[in-house]
Image (spheres, rainbow, N blue to C red):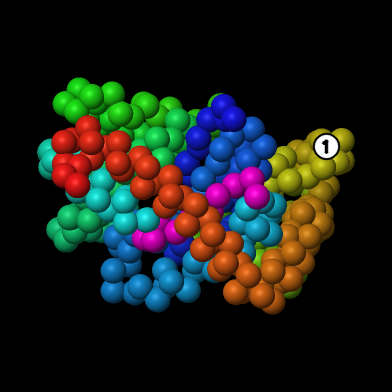
Amino acid sequence: MNKKIVLTGDRPTGPLHLGHYVGSLRNRLVLQETCNQFVMLADVQGLTDNVENPEKIANNILEVALDYLAIGIDPTKTTIFIQSMIPEIAELTVYYLNLVTVARLERNPTVKNEIHQKGMEKNVSVGFLAYPVSQAADITFLNAELVPVGHDQLPVIEQTVEIVRRFNRIYGEVFVEPQAMMPSNEEVGRLPGIDGKAKMSKSLGNAIYLSDEPDELLKKVMAMYTDPEHIHVEDPGKIEGNTVFMYLDIFGTDKEQIVQLKEHYQRGGLGDVKVKRYLNEVLQAFLEPIRTRRKELAKDPAAVMDILKKGTAATRERAAVMMQKIRQAMKINYF
C-alpha cells in the first residue's frame, strides 16, 4: 500500500535494443516488484523531432510494447500507458509554461546537447525547447516520487524540481519533489555501440535490437569493434575499450571462462574471431527467449493494444484526481 510511485518510459521511435536493456529495462524488472511503477510510451516527446513523420511514432507504439512484454514487464505489476492519451499532461504543461523562462530552458544542458547533436541550432521548435516542461508534467501528474535516469538526464529532473518548488510556493503544497534514481556507476548503465562509440543508438546504426534474428545478430557481433592494434592472432590484445569484452562482462554468465579469455587475449594467441563467436553464443542464449516470447505476443497485436488501453485508462483515472487537486490549488475549479 505504501509503495513509492516510479515514472519511467521511452520515446517510441523504433524497437528497443540491448542499450535500453542495460540502461533501463532490467532495472524496471526489479522496480515492478518493489514500487508502484508506471511506464510511459512518450509519443508526444517523440513528435518533437518527428513532427513530419507521425507514422514513425504510431507504428512503433506496438513495437516498443512488444519489447516491454517480451523482456518480462508484467502489466499486472507495471502500468503501461500512452502519453498522448492522457490530456491532463498537456493541460499541466500549459500551466507550467508560465513558471519557466525561455532563458532557463536555453541553459538546460540536456536540451543544449540534443539541439547540437541534431543540428537544430537555427531551427529549434518551441515544443523541442520546452520538452523539459512537458517532462515535468509527465512526472508530476502522477506525483511520482522516483524517476530512473542516466546522468545526462539529471538536468531535466533538476528543472522539474525547480518547477515543483515554484508551484508549491505560489499555490500551496501540492506536489512531492521527485528524486532521480541514477546508476551508481554510469559505465554499468550504458552500453557502447557495436562500433565502439560511447552509446548504442538507433540513429547511429550501431545497435543490437532485442528482436534481431540469429543471422542478423551474428553479423553484428562479427563486425564489432575490438582492439585495432590486435592485427595478428599471436599479438597481445587490449581488453580496455574492447567492445566484445565489455559485452561479455555484462551478458556472460561463466565469469571464470571470461577471465581466462581475457588473460589469453592479453598475452597473445587468441584471435578476435574466436572471442566474437563466443560472444555470439552468449547473446544468442540471452536473446532467444525474448525473441520467442515477442513472436508469440506479436501473433495477437489486439491483445497487446488492449493492455495499453487498460493501462492508459487506469492512469487517466489517477490523473483526473490529481488535476482536481491542482485546479483547486490554482483556484480555477469553477464548477
Magenta residue check for 186? no
The part of the chain drawn in magenta is 76-85
Q: Position of residue 10 (x, y in %)?
A: 47, 53
**Which residue: 18% across, 35% down?**
330
Hey, which quadrant is residue 85 in on the image? bottom left
Q: Position of residue 228 (x, y in %)?
A: 61, 51
Q: Position of residue 134 (x, y in %)?
A: 29, 48
Residue 107 seen in the figure: no
Q: Is residue 286 left or right of residue 207?
A: right
Q: Is residue 100 left or right of residue 112?
A: left
Q: Nearer the viewer, residue 142 or 290?
A: 142
Note whether 316 is above or below 332 in the view shown. Answer: below
**Which residue: 40% across, 76% down?**
55
Note whether 128 is above or below 324 in the view shown. Answer: below
Residue 316 seen in the figure: yes
Q: Nearer the viewer, residue 134 or 226?
A: 134
Specify the quadrant that holds the N terminus: top right
Q: Position of residue 57 (x, y in %)?
A: 42, 68
**Which residue: 81% across, 57% down?**
285
Hey, which quadrant is residue 310 in on the image? bottom right
In the rendered image, which residue does mark 1 sit on? 255
Q: Badge 1, how many Cα within 10 Å: few under 14, some, many 20+?
A: few
Instruction: Identify the amino acid type marked 1.
Output: Lys
Note whether 104 is above or below 286 in the view shown. Answer: above
Note whether 208 is above or below 213 in the view shown. Answer: above
**Which residue: 85% across, 41% down?**
254
Magenta residue check for 81? yes
Q: Secondary structure at mark 1?
A: helix
